[in-house]
Amino acid sequence: MTRLDAILSVPRSAELAALVLRLGLGAVFLAHALAKPLVFTLPGTAAFFAASGFPGWTAYPVFLAELLGGAALLAGLRTRLVALALLPVMAGALLVHLPNGWMFSGQGGGWEYVAFLMIALGAQALLGDGVLAVGRLPVASNRNRPASRA
């Protein structure tokens, strides 16, 4: 059995759970990132950030973090690091939503959803990539190549 066959074989349930969580988180972060330019516009998002007590310009790095982080999670690239790197972004969102109460369905959105995403990111950081991740693909090695002669 080759290494690729082993990676693509039926995974243990924890490996499959890590994959499902990673794909779900990746989709959520991509959706949140793309809503900023496509629904609210980036200047509109910057104005919301400023109205929420953050410098308006921070909307742009948050957009990039969510976009690149979501894509990396979907691909399974540096999953643990990406999950941890997204926690400060969610901590900022938590600060915005704390005054609005627990339920996210309340006016202004409560903090339950943000807290859940933070817990899910922490679980993802602990679980790692799961199966079918770019970070787990075998890398071509030089071990099996003949030495070149200079």
Image: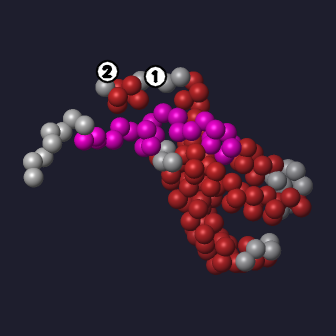
- Taking the magenta stretch, the answer to whether it contains residue 130 is yes
Closer to the camera in the image, 72 or 150: 150
Q: Which mark is residue 10?
A: 1
Q: Which mark is residue 102?
A: none
Quick one: label 1, few (<14), some, or many (20+) residues within 10 Å? few
Q: Is residue 122 above or below residue 89?
A: above
Quick one: label 2, few (<14), some, or many (20+) residues within 10 Å? few
Start and end of the magenta stretch? 120-142
* Residue kind at label 2, given as amino acid type: Met
Indicate which label's residue lies in the foreground, 1 or 2: 2
Residue 138 at x, y percent in the picture: 35, 37
**Distance from the alpha carbon under mark 1 to that under mark 2:** 13 Å
Task: Specify the quadrant of the image occupied by residue 52.
Answer: bottom right
The answer to whether one can see residue 31 in this image is no
The quadrant of the picture occupied by the N terminus is top left
* Residue pointed to by mark 2: 1
Left or right: where 29 falls relative to 94 = left
Residue at image position (40%, 28%) is 8
